[in-house]
Image: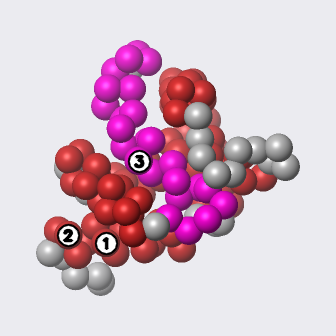
Amino acid sequence: MDAQTLVDERGELWLALAPLWLDREPGEREFTHMVEVIQRHDLTLHQLEWIFRLELAPVLSRNQMSVASEWRKFDDYQLMKRLVAHNMRLKGWRRKSWALFSGLTTMMTRHRWNELMMRVMLERGESPS
């Protein structure tokens, strides 16, 4: 997959979900926007989980560990460049490595992700199992 296809297919979703990694809890408006974007992409909860773990967390978790990171908002252009570069290399052993370590890279945002997934399930009329 080329860079432009990645941006076309995932860009809106990636940018909508990025606030999960900021230093504050997402507000009601942000959660609502995330749910709306997720619904437009028509992805299963399983697919969303792997996007969270493999496509987003390896890039965005670095932001949480950096002392000099941007914590209030992201520069969308720079963030998209980093996400595209990461995802262009996400094949073979890299994909397996990130899958193995995804528990560590999602640890700080897991509670926010769980809240978002509950909202998505409610929007879809699904009940939590």
Task: Identify residue for label 1.
Answer: 119
Q: Disc 2 vs disc 3: Cβ atoms closer than 8 Å?
A: no
Q: Would you identify the image quadrant in which residue 41 lies? A: top left
Q: Which mark is residue 123?
A: 2
Indicate the position of residue 118 as horizontal and vertical percent values: 34, 75
* Residue 17 colored in magenta in the image: yes
Residue type highlighted by circle 1:
Arg
How many neighbours does mark 3 have within 10 angstroms: few (below 14), some (14-19), or many (20 or more)? some
Per the rendered image, the range of residues in magenta is 2-26
| Res. 90 in view | no
**Looking at the rendering, in which quadrant would you find the N terminus?**
top left
In this rendering, the count of numbered labels is 3
How many neighbours does mark 1 have within 10 angstroms: few (below 14), some (14-19), or many (20 or more)? some
Would you place residue 30 above or below residue 6 in this image?
below
Q: Disc 1 vs disc 2: Cβ atoms closer than 8 Å?
A: yes
Q: Decide which of 98, 8 is in the foreground and name it.
A: 8
Residue type highlighted by circle 3:
Ala
Q: Decide which of 112, 76 is in the foreground and name it.
A: 76
Q: Which mark is residue 16?
A: 3
Q: What residue do we see at 44% from left, 18% from top? A: 3
Q: Decide which of 27, 7 is in the foreground and name it.
A: 27
